[in-house]
Amino acid sequence: MRYEERMIDEVQSLNDIVEVISSYIPLKRSGRTFKALCPFHQEKTPSFNVHPEKQIYHCFGCGVGGNVFSFLMKYENLTFPEALRNLAGRVNFALPEPTQRSTEEVSESEGLYEAYRLAQEYYSNNLKHPEKGQAARTYLKKRGFEEDILQEFPLGWATPEWRGLFEFLTRRGVKDTVIYRSGLALRSREGNPYDLFRGRILFPIHNLQGKVIAFGGRGIGDEMPKYLNSSESAIFRKRKELFGLHLAKRFLSREDSKILIVEGYFDFLRVYRSGFPNVAATLGTALTEDHVRVLKRFTHEAVFIYDGDQAGQAASLRGLEVFLEGEMSIKIVVLPQAKDPDSFILDKGPEEFRKLLDTAQDFFDFKWNYLRHRYDPSDSAGLLKISTEFIETLSKIKSSLLLDRYMKKLAKLLGVGEASLRNELVIFQQKIRSRERSIVSQVTSKPLGNEYPEEWTLISLLLEEPSFWEKEGTSLSSEDFKHPRAREVFQILERLTASGKEIGYSQVFNRLEEESVKSFIAAYSLTELTQKDKEKAFSDCLRKLKQRRVEERLEKLRQAIVDAEEGGEKGKVTELLQEYRLLLTQKG
Ligand SMILES: [Zn+2]
């Protein structure tokens, strides 16, 4: 579903960025911009800038930036359509029903959804098939899952055949290109198709709307690796998806409900089926901000269930810190040694599991108990070790209220003064900030700009000074841009001017998908240049791009001349040589 660009521009222009942001955080005027303490990272001096003329914001501290939509999406954890509706509501703008996506986009994702829907049907029938599915059903039974599970969870079975699915999809009219793009089949070096999943039980991964977008596959013999997931595609992004959340979300609407997070597919099945439907599984990847954003739409508390031998990993809270940063409350349960949720429930039953969940500890208490047993708090080296580890974790907490409470608690437990702990926290945050700053400078030069800085400078100058476009815009073409993102921005500029629209940061941002590109451009925009500097920079960059174009053409000509000579095409050689010489003189 997509709203028309015209609507997006209009809603954006009705919502002044300074007004909107200042309704969330206090802004202070400073010259041509407004400054504030950044709401997205902890800081003592303001590095968050809002630019009223350009209608963009940017933080020098953590590198985020964008327009009014980007701000709302990030601040309120909203999707783009949600942010759009929110801002439209703010100015009483009546949004019409969203129009369909462009046909190209529709056909790409729709094609993939269709391929996965059919694959699901195929794999599911395989598992139910009396002979074909026998081995898989036996395996499931051995693991304690009877056939009735298939009514609730449409598990599948990929037989060991090389192209069972490929042939099935082809018979159902799915094009080869779509099959390859879905990742469900690959091509051998000789160009022969073969299925990705062979000899595996398949767990369909659904998006929140309940559509199958990928599979997780568990080998039942000695297949390597033991678990294999679909590769990413236009409809599947690992860092956004949690297995089973489309089912769990229905149980997360109540105020007190929390999400249980487990690691494996079988753990999910067991926990869900044992009367705990508020569960989701990670897809074998680290937890990301995107996961937190999605979860926060349904709940504010997550309970992590760790295998017994992962206590250390749990205490270090790596991966969980994104939840603290996202201001979600975290609790932790560690199972007895050598148990995962699946084997624990099989062994002890759901009631014992429920009791165990009741013992879930707040991350603070959990960490304290773990560290206390590892290091001796009465010994000064131990004390230092514990406080350092804690401070690292506590520095992720954004709410000062919560941080206050934890600092008091920690000071009391360690028997040290709160002031000295505070002091350590400040020192630690300073260290992090300087590290972040160097990361920011890396991010802003890599991976977007490092390779083709002249292209990015040119882009930002075109945005900054519309007169540059009027003068030189048509002498450039999108092929002159080597960086795919810079090329994308240039194409947006072309489209905007072709339809007689104004060129500006906001118009371009409204048409750009990737937030990181917006942050990057916003960062570029804040370098203050005089008009003279701008003109000089513009003509330098323009010359570089044009020179590169000439050099590429020369290279192609050299190749063509060699080919023509080998082919004995004398007339063609002369012709090509003429063009070659002409270009050389132009290059000067
Ligand atoms: Zn920041």
Image (tube, grey):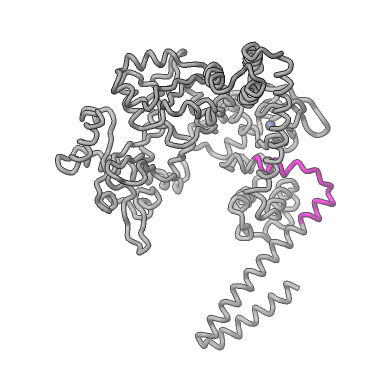
| Image point (73%, 58%), residue name | 541
Which secondary structure is most common in the magenta stretch? helix
Q: 348 or 566: which is nearer to us?
A: 348
The picture quadrant where one finds residue 305 is top left
Residue 35 vertical position relative to residue 165 in the rendered view, above or below: above
Taking the image as drawn, is residue 43 in sight? yes
Where residue 66 sits in the image (x, y, percent)? 65, 37
Q: Which residues are magenta?
A: 519-538
Residue 579 vertical position relative to residue 134 in the rendered view, above or below: below
Residue 80 vertical position relative to residue 425 in the rendered view, above or below: below
Q: 551 or 159: which is nearer to us?
A: 159
Q: Is residue 524 magenta?
A: yes
Q: 13 or 505: which is nearer to us?
A: 505
Where residue 474 sits in the image (x, y, percent)? 67, 58
Taking the image as drawn, is residue 397 in sight? no
Q: Quadrant of the C terminus?
A: bottom right
Q: Report whether 123 appears left or right of 509.
A: left
| Image point (53%, 86%), residue name | 569
Q: Report whether 201 appears left or right of 80.
A: left
| Image point (52%, 85%), residue name | 566
